[in-house]
Image (cartoon, coloured by chain):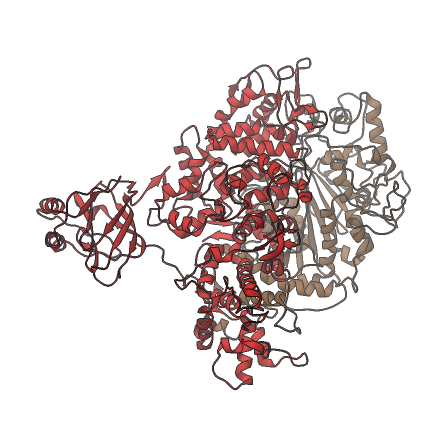
Chain colours: A brown, B red
Amino acid sequence: MMKNANNLDRRRFLQAALGAGLVWGGGVFPRMASAAPAPLTHRILVNLMLDGGPDFRHLIVPAFDTAGGSFGNLYWTYRRRAHRLGAGNNPLRRRWEDDYYPITVGGDGWNSGLVDAGNLNTGVTFGIWREAGWLIDMFRAGNAALVFNAVGGTNRAHDLSTLMLNQGNLTSGLNDADRSGWGGRLARSAGRRSISLLSSPSAFNFGPVGDAPGYNPNAIDNRDLVSVDDAREMGLFDPAPDGSPHGDFNDKMARAAKSYYAGLRQEQIHQAYEKFMDHEAKVRAFGEQLQERLDDDTLPMPILLEALRNDVDGINPDPANNGSTGRRVLRSRGFASQVRNLHDVIVANDLLNPGVLAMRYGGWDSHADQRQTPTVLNQDPDNPFESRGIESGFRDIFGGQCGVQYGISPSNPDALHCGFSALWASLPPEDLQNIVITIAGEFGRQIRDNGGAGTDHGRGNLMLVISDGCQGGIYGEMFPDDEIAKYESSSRSPDISPRTEIDPLFAAVCDWVSPFSGAAVFPRTVGQGGTPMIELPGMFDGMLYDI
Amino acid sequence: MSAVVLAEWPGLTRRLALVLALVAASAIYPAHAINSSELGGLQTILHEYLLEGGTTTELALDETESGAHIVSTDAPLSAQFSAVGEDLELCFFLRSSGDLQGGGIVFEINGDSLDLVEGENCFSLPLAMQETTNVAYWQVDPPDAGLAIFSLGISHANPIQLGLPVLTRGGWDERAVRKVLKVFAFGGHALEPQIHAWANMPPGDAIREMLTFDEHNPKLSPILPGDRYDDTASAHGTLTGFQNFISSRSSFLPIPNDRRDQYGLDGYNFDDAFNRMITVRGMNPFRQRIGFWETNYHLAVNLDASVSRRQVARYYDDIMAAHAAGLPYHEVLGVAAKSAAVAMQYGHRNNRWSPWSGECECNEDFAREIHQLYYGIFGEGDPDHESETIPETAKLLTDMEVPYIQNQGFATEVDFDTDRHFPGAVTIFGQQVSGVDASAKIDNLMPLSMQHPEAKKNLPVMIIAGLADDNLDEARMEQLRAAWEALGPSKDFLAFIRGYAISEMFHSQEQFKYFTTHERALYMANKSNLENIEAYFGGAYYNGGRAGRTVGSVVEEDLAGDFFRPLHNVFGGQNSVEASDSALAFENNYNRLTDREGDMRTTVGCDDCDRGQSWEKRWEDVLPRRADGKYYVADVAAWLWMHAVGNFDNYTELERAHLYALLGAAIIDPGRYNDGDNAFDFNLLMCVILDYQVEESAIDAPVTEILTGRSWNDYCDADDGVYDQHELDALNAAYTGQDIADSPLIQGVLDELGSMTLPLNASGPGHYNNGANLRRHARERVSSALGFIFTTPFVFAEGG
């Protein structure tokens, strides 16, 4: 045995013929140039992952009830600290009346056409946080399905439940990170791309190995995956095509790197380095096309979307600063960037051919202080720099005209809009008809608050499906009777019992995006690998329909 | 064991007799496997052989001689060792003054003649080929030749450590050393001689030197000789100490006084203070590697989650002090669990037991994560995990106040009290955990946690998956679990890491590790910086000059989350798979090294940025020089690749061509200011050459002639903004390795470039500005070449 032998020949050359006479060019991706927005002519899924386990029981609540032992009494009694309310019934009542928009199933606020699947909630009064104006609008318009008692992760551990939810596989364990995500499977089924709007894609986007419908979901092939962190800035630096090649060192290095990658592409390298070859090809090709399409002069960012992240004159000026002409609208600049990016991918959909798009919003692990009420908000409710606990997130995502108390404050359609509201106001109706949004977190939270004015990990939760093609309404029992006993039981960590697993819910979404894809994306729905739980059989049939 | 001289060797007669006897009964086996057979009377011959003279030494299993043997014509060497009932490996390090292939230098084991190489030699001896007494023999015939034999020893051919098969000394080489440094020490700062020395040591001995928890490891992180910023060689090795040092106006540093406050404990730039602690020489990058993982991943706390800088620094230092003290790992985790940083992070500093209501006014956050994140205990299959273990753990974590100190903020220590602490024992994992306060209960819980079946299953995998391997399969995980179990109930974390770091598992083809943005940025900085001025600058522009490689801006641009502000809060920072999937990280790296290549190329010197003095990057001190004292492009290219990548797996014609061009192809204009400047990329060079051939109707391509004087830009230049087609084709060509290998023209060019030299130490009146420009241009080309390597896929991962 000898050592210290250098191995200069380990890397194999691919077919020699491929290497002869190559030029770097556009390579594997078609080139389509156009300066105008492309209409969205196919359906897409936008999935928003809420990391941390959002307390949707804070967003949608039962009506306050003074009757002891009623759900509406127990909820408010055992959530007093999480809502930051004082002793007695009056603070509870005021909070309910002031801050939640009341809807009674089949009664007040309940528009015709809304669904109460299985009539499980007849006569139940609930409230949606008034600052979630866009959600209220979408719900009342019949475009939002609220799916109660849903579960995406079967345990209370963030990482494992997140993996399960992203993969759409409740059987996954911690060591199963090498499985595909349900978004990646849907994209493959649809014959389209899996787009991450994040700096790093999550497991949701990872594609399966092979072609639909017989692909292997338990392995990853990301050939469809494209990360678009910033569609307007994406791209690799290129040498100037017409400059002098001798003096510009930037060009020299760029030319060397570009030539090198083009040459290396003809050789076989270890799998550990393949991802970076993939990045080089996709960022180069798509970056060139996107920058051409999304030129700020010819296709500027719509003003409402621009205002989400950046100061825009006339939108959200600081009332405490006379010199202020505008402030950004959203607290989370990251989410604002994703919404802008979502817009750009949609208007450039002919270049990217998106099938699914992934977004995320974090900060939902609200063990403490889940509602914060800085006094400055009394005078400046649209202040994006003050944390309001999880209400900041709800506002960023679901807020209509931000700061407006839905049903109380006068509305102004020309004023600032929060995240999805701004997007909806910035895209043509024809595009909106082809979009479905799913919103979920990895688990719910316990039904009683804790000593830190927060809530601890639970299981069941609310999930949302929002689309112009959605049969909106209530899916599942909103406030299950069996929870009443849990509130005052000796159980030390009562939560919402799961009744519906994600498989049938998201399979229905998949079928809408790409007909007959649901069974391949969620094979348990057709009995492969178990039978998923559903509160009412067939509950999601017709939840999404052709417009 | 030292060499023992038994007798004078009378000559060759007896040796030949012995050899003949051995050979007569032996078959020749390939690959240095030593044949054996039953030899009648061998013992007798051996006895005589040993008694009749020569220098003879006895070898014992797993012992390596510390001395050297000199072998000459008059002084052969024999080493004997007994069979030990298993396969063996014999190794030694050789320096020779003769021709090893010339036939006059003989090396035999049990009579089989074997080839030698300069450097380390290892030979395996399967059990079946061993004799009762075995003899290795060195003989030199030419009078002018000689051998020096160092580090002679025998060891197990299939060594096991903690149940893991580990590399033999023969399998442990420079590549293996660099791999360990790359994965476990952000590349480290060890200089070439030290890397070679480690490569030539038994792996167990080397790894004990490489991976330590001391605040300073002078072999892993030596100060470059002559570096005047050497205070960190023996002081300031804690995070608190380093931040105090780097922010102090009385410290001897190249950072301007008015720019130092930011790096202090109360400064805003905690991030850059910590990354300088890893890039500055003199301390211990392995300690920081583990500290970074512990505090930003495994036991993560977050400066954005109410934890103060002082608390984080204290947390970091306490954990690493516990590691350095060799505490069992469950005690290290106990230190973390009892910290103020963690109590702030999770909010259990507010947890109170109410003796009046009999209720725990608590949250369950850390009550869950102390099991899950610290040990990997999820409660799988335990029906009481949610209903008992977690609520009971919340009761354990009561009355852990972090006092608020006026004008100072929250304290860096928890005040463990009993008034509002749950007074009795709590039931966790079905076992009683008692203690007068939370501190005592944590102390009693930690050993139980370490012995939990889920901890045994998950914790060793969490450690290795987090630090070193993104491709673990179930079989390898089982190996790790067995190794962890072999540590016994008191887990020696360092022994586990050391055992893994020399294991066949880590050095196998199956292992690979993607680098997070932080790891890659730190690795590239450590591979780029040479002196501490560069590390302290960290790419900043101070005193009218720029030096060093940035870390912080790489992390920031990649949206990877600052140090101690982990992307996933308590679930840790950007992980390696996320980093590998980040097209943004790739895009940023690529654009930084192309669009902003000047940050790399031009940070090789300054007029007065070094506290008023000039500074030149000292590539000449580390790059290889031949006997003529010159730096050849071929040598420098290979050195840079090995330096930056750690192996030659992907150093092929393709890489060679690009590096040779960047290093070698520059203006040749002696005596003028631009001599050696304006390096050419490979495509441009080929364009120039091909255009030269067209323009001059030439068939040859003399690079030195084409690039000389004022003709260097006569070729491959757009006339009136328009290139000829052959120029465009060359500029845009995607040369493959095969193209390069098959082209006599290109091979000729590369031969010429490879034999060029880099005037890194040029001086004298014959050069413009006494050689300063020439030296600078040479340094720039070296840095550019390194920058090119940093654009390749091979800096984003390790392994395979």
Asked where in the image residue B404 lies, by quadrant, the reply is: top right
Q: Farthest residue to the top: give it.
A: B356
Q: Farthest residue to the front: give it.
A: B765
Residue at 50% from the left image edge and 27% from the top image edge: B331
- Look at the picture and state if B317 lies above or below B475: above
Quarter of the figure that contains the C terminus of chain A: bottom right
Asked where in the image residue A513 lies, by quadrant, the reply is: bottom right
Regarding residue A154, the answer to whether it shows in the image is yes
Number of callouts? 0
Residue at 16% from the left image edge and 48% from the top image edge: B54
Q: Tell me residue B462's x, y (percent).
A: 50, 39
Q: Tell me residue B482's x, y (percent).
A: 40, 36
Regarding residue B372, the answer to whether it shows in the image is no
The foreground one among A59 and B285 is B285
- Look at the picture and state if B369 lies above or below B416: below
Left or right of B57 in this view: A483 = right
Q: Tell me residue B552's x, y (percent).
A: 63, 48
Q: Tell me residue B273's x, y (percent).
A: 61, 42
Left or right of A70 in this view: B738 = left
The foreground one among A396 and B293 is B293
